[in-house]
Amino acid sequence: MAEQTGSIETWRVKAFRENVRYAVGQKESRLSPYCDQDGDMIGDLTFFDNIGRALPQKKTQDKKDSPDMGLDHGRRASSYESYEWGTLLPKKAKLETLHDPANHYTVAATHGFNVRKDDEIIRAAFATAREGEKGDILAPFPSRQIIPHNNEGLTLDKLLLMNQWLAEDDVETERKRFCVIGAAQVTDLLNIAEARSMDTNAVRTLYEGQIAHFMGFHFLHSQKLDKDENGHRKAFTFLEGAFGLGKPGNIEVNIAPDPGKSFRTRIYMEIGAVRKEDKYVLQVLCKEPVSTRPA
């Protein structure tokens, strides 16, 4: 007879636990695939290193000491937020499919935690970062990285300015560029004639109602973007690897009897993100029209 936990076989519980851990750990959210996830965990922080660039010196004579280029070496640290997810498992039929990786509980938990991954990345875009060897130096988001709203939404001029500012900071051209925008900015983008008229975008615009790529930027949609104190949406553009995503420990999954309520499952995860380099992130303020949609 199978070993049981309450009235759920232990093997089903273990399978569910491993499925959730694997799915949340391996299935990426919208933004997490483009983050650096290879930090060093020290205490309750995860550190990400930033190594500067230096050009080689011209060799002028033989038997000369090798140069010390004095590379800049910066560190930024991510702290963590704790999240939990829970639900009741009331029906025997659902308990019997608990071990299936495609069961509704695994899918729902995975989706929920991936949303939280993106929440942490979006928060880190403009949050005060922690830097230094101990992570005890505060680095606020620089005002020089903010493109003003100019009483407009997302326009071609703003996209051109985003491209120009990144070029002025001499960022690596091989890094992919992303722009995170809300629903109103998606509409703005669809109204830019130059974006619609491109052959590669024409079919997608016509059939799918979206533009995924324009002027070197890959567009990612999120309805989690905050507004500033004047009601302007804080969209942002970033380069691949601009954020560090820290996940310090295993995802904990517990299933236990709940008196009078069948079984209750709880899942715990810690996660945090940090803006690694300021020059890789631009805030793009966008005016939005007043919504005419009924509340």
Image: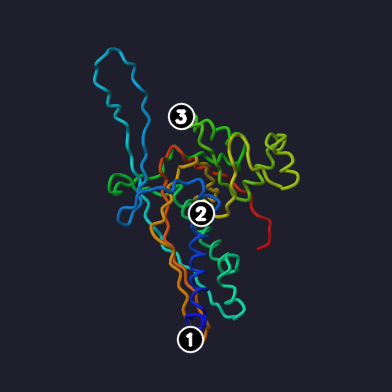
Is 219 drawn above or below residue 120 in the view shown? above
Is 137 drawn above or below residue 100 in the view shown? above
Residue 180 in percent (x, y) is at 56, 46
Observer-side mark, 2 or 1, equals: 1
Residue wearing tag 1: 259
Contact check, label 3 and label 1, Cβ < 8 Å: no
Residue type pointed to by label 3:
Asp
Residue 99 vs residue 129, the one in the foreground: 99
Q: Quadrant of residue 112?
A: bottom right
Please report the residue visible at 52 percent of the width from the left and 41 percent of the height from the top: 237
Residue type pointed to by label 1:
Pro
Q: Is residue 110 left or right of residue 58?
A: right
Residue 285 in percent (x, y) is at 53, 44
Q: Secondary structure at mark 1?
A: loop
Is 98 drawn above or below residue 30 in the view shown? below
Residue wearing tag 2: 118
Which is more N-terminal, label 1 or label 2? 2
Which is more N-terminal, label 1 or label 3? 3
Observer-side mark, 3 or 1, equals: 1
Q: Which mark is residue 109?
A: none
Residue 74 vs residue 229, the one in the foreground: 74
Q: Secondary structure at mark 2?
A: helix
Crowd band around label 1 with a 10 angstrom C-alpha radius: few (<14), some (14–19), many (20+): few
Q: Secondary structure at mark 3?
A: loop
Residue wearing tag 3: 170
